[in-house]
Image (tube, rainbow, N blue to C red):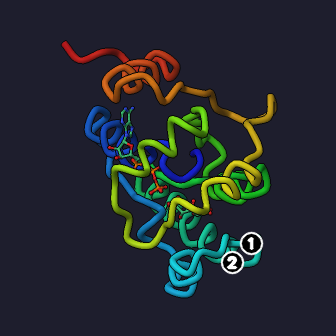
Amino acid sequence: MGVSGSGKSTIGQSLADAFGREFIDGDDLHPTANKQKMAAGHALNDEDRAPWLEIIAQRIGSELAEGQPIVVACSALKRRYRDQLVSYAPETVFVHLIGERDVIAERQSHRTHEYMPTSLLDSQFATLEPLDDAENGFVVDVTLTPEQIVAAVRDELGTPHAG
Ligand SMILES: Nc1ncnc2c1ncn2[C@@H]1O[C@H](COP(=O)(O)OP(=O)(O)OP(=O)(O)O)[C@@H](O)[C@H]1O
Ligand SMILES: O=C(O)[C@H](O)[C@@H](O)[C@H](O)[C@H](O)CO
């Protein structure tokens, strides 16, 4: 989880590779109307996000039911969004990629995105609700390298290091 540009796609793929799990990028599951809205420079609202979150939540649940826990990248900015995501898989663990706005804006300026304009970054921060103590998750600093972040997640989850 984390704002746009915090590294969810990059780190999510790295975690999936490290843990030998399938990776799902929530970006790819947005209804077309949502992509068009963001591409036009408008932030999504709760109503826009609800069907998208449901698609992701059901995917997490169905993979888990098959015995395949997966790694998912999803902004999951609000507590209620995260509650929706865990509804089919209560053991879900959130990794919040946290970083200063300027660090993330600088990274965004060096990449191209299918539909997300950098102009929406402030709205992403305004919407963001940090993990609550009652939630199952932890934070990682985005200024660490991807390798360091994977190692930090391993340590938090108690997953043995390879070799
Ligand atoms: N830990 C890191 N150190 C340095 N650069 C990083 C790190 N993580 C991601 N990046 C770079 O930052 C940019 C944004 O990363 P990424 O696209 O993975 O973020 P995202 O959260 O998936 O964004 P969005 O939600 O908008 O799709 C990319 O250019 C990526 O290569
Ligand atoms: O909840 C949201 O506002 C959206 O999911 C965005 O965060 C983007 O989909 C994504 O992160 C791509 O930049």
24 and 87: which is toward the camera: 24
Q: Residue at x 41, y 59 (%)?
A: 25
Indicate which disc residue 7 carries: none
* In front of the other: 50 or 126: 126
Residue 70 seen from this side: no
Task: Work out which quarter of the rendered image holds the N terminus and state it.
Answer: top right
Does residue 36 appear in this view? yes
Residue farthest to the bottom? 33
- Is 109 placed above or below 104 here? below
Image coordinates for residue 159, horizontal then vertical, percent: 40, 20
Classify 10 Å Cα crowding around label 1: few (below 14), some (14-19), many (20 and above): few
Label 1 element class: loop
Q: Mark 2 belongs to which amino acid?
A: Asp
Density class for disc 2 (Cα within 10 Å; few <14, some 14-19, many ≥20) is some
Q: Which residue is mark 2?
A: 48
Disc 1 marks a residue whose amino acid type is Asn
Q: Are marks 1 and 2 in contact (CB under 8 Å)?
A: yes
For ligand 2, tell me if the residue under mark 2 lies within 8 Å: no
Numbered disc total: 2
Q: Is residue 28 above or below residue 97?
A: below
Which residue is found at the position 48% from the left and 30% from the top?
142
Helix, strand or loop at mark 2: helix
Which residue is identified by label 1?
45
